[in-house]
Image (cartoon, grey):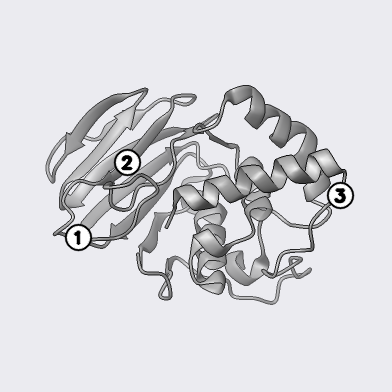
Amino acid sequence: MWTQKNLARLCACAVIAVGAGILPQRSTTPTSPSSPSKHPGLGRVFENSVSGDRSRFTILEGAEDTLGEYLRVEELIRAGSPGFEKGKSGSPPLHVHNHQQECFEVRSGSFSYQMEGVEGRLRPGDKAACIPAGKRHNFWNADNATDLTVVYTLTPALTSGRFFQTLCGLAQDAGTLDNVNPLQLFVTFTHYDLQLAIMPKPVWLVISKVWVPVLQLYWHPYYTKYTG
């Protein structure tokens, strides 16, 4: 789902646009949420059936079920799925949840994760591993030959359900997440209080605090086509 190429595009577009004082053309993804929403959205079970990774997400308990206390999402990461980090199947980029704890529980397969550079591994029946808010972390399918099913619990829930729906929907429409306009990803990540930790924090802060408000004139953080 994620590749080094996409990050390079994302950083380069932002730097060039800021330096030139211009914005690129609007993304080919949907340009505005419908208001009021007439879309059913992706619902509680959704997957990118176009991309080679074919990850499937199931919202087990949404914010509306827990009064915002937490969100539980199950992801199926299929064997051999591409990842952001080479050799780490299904891995997202190194990232930080600024105000949420994230816990992992494995239902099938073998799951590896790292927090601040320290790696761990989980298998079915193991005690859940939890990442405190503000800690850099990543995860991946430890066995490329076997599907992995893992449950994420995010506390508090905030609006993370929309984040999963939006990311999956954007990837579905573009073919892969790598084809989504990188500036769209800046807007979406910032809106959902996520930090891309693979770039220096000062750079991310400048982009998210100074540039993203301008980008929001062109791209929206979520779309009712996906979120309902």
* Total number of numbered discs in the rendering: 3
**Residue identifier under label 2:** 139
Percent coordinates x, y for residue 1 in the rendering:
42, 58
Q: Name the residue type under label 3.
A: Ile
Q: Is residue 210 left or right of residue 155?
A: right
Front residue of 4/107: it is 4
Q: Is residue 173 above or below residue 102?
A: below
Q: Quadrant of the C terminus?
A: bottom right
**x and y, in percent, of residue 8 in the image:** 56, 46
**Badge 1 amino acid:** Asp
Camera-near label (2 vs 3) is 3
> Label 2 is placed on what type of residue?
Phe
Which residue corresponds to mark 1?
147
| Residue in view at x 27 percent, y 50 percent | 150
**Nearer-N-terminus badge (2/3):** 3
Q: Residues within 10 Å of mark 2 (few under 14, many from 20)?
A: many
Compared with residue 31, is residue 184 higher up or lower down, i.e. above or below?
above
Kind of element beneath mark 3: loop
Residue under numbered circle 3: 22
Please state which of residues 208 and 24 is positioned toward the viewer in this rendering: 24
Element class at badge 1 = loop
Measured Cα–Cα span from mark 3 to mark 1: 44 Å
* Sequence-first tag of 3 and 1: 3
